[in-house]
Image (cartoon, rainbow, N blue to C red):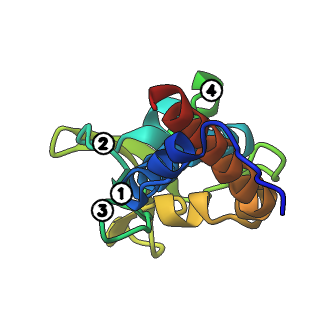
Amino acid sequence: MADIKIKGLRKFAKLLDPKKVERATVNALNQTATEYRKITVNEAAKIFNIPKSRIKKDSRGKDTTFIEKARKGKEKVVIEYRGNRPGLHHFSPNKQMINKKKPPKIRIKKSGKVETIERGFFATANESRGLFEREGKKRYPISRRTGPSMKQMYEDDDIEGKFEKKTTSLFKDKFDVAFDKLFKEG
């Protein structure tokens, strides 16, 4: 009978403490969610004709995404998209498009076509700027024109489809780093 000894086996068993593995998993999930949010904001700014700062925050300065982080006993992350629909005036940063003599022109997606709002005009109401449109042939009623909601922007096929596979590999990479950190601590 042969006697085989593996050096460092007890140290390895201590490192595989379930609490430490759970902590590493939670850390990897939270880092993945934060990275995913950053990537989707950058990608939305590439696709939509709206400034990145307006994608990140709504008109009141509040974040448009909320991450419900993973924690001990709840190993899942929820990314919630919040905020009201940005006004169409955010999709026309070009000052040449704002001309009082001609109807406003808007391009929502950078690769999309330019849309002309025939009876539209830019105005300030209640201390906030916006693009408004007369609904009938008369002066009133007037409605405020808005673009897609933040949720619609983030869940656009061009964005969401790109990152389904990437999210899995991103989590694997973050988990590997967290697990390596466990071995260095022990």
Distance CA(mark 3)–CA(mark 1): 9 Å
Asked whether, in this view, residue 158 is left or right of residue 61, the answer is right
Residue at screen point 66% across, 37% down: 7
- Residue 148: x and y, percent? 54, 62
Residue under pointer 1: 19
Viewer-side label of 3, 2: 3
Residue under pointer 3: 72
Residue under pointer 2: 59
Residue at screen point 79% across, 61% down: 165
| Residue kind at label 1, given as amino acid type | Lys
Distance CA(mark 4)–CA(mark 3): 48 Å
Residue at screen point 78% across, 64% down: 161
Q: Is residue 148 visible?
A: yes
Q: Earlier in the sequence, mark 1 or mark 2?
A: 1
Q: Residue furthest left?
A: 126
Distance CA(mark 4)–CA(mark 1): 54 Å
Residue under pointer 4: 94
Q: Dot 2 lies on which element?
A: loop
Q: Dot 1 lies on which element?
A: helix
Q: Image height check: is 71 above or below 107?
A: below
Distance CA(mark 3)–CA(mark 2): 35 Å
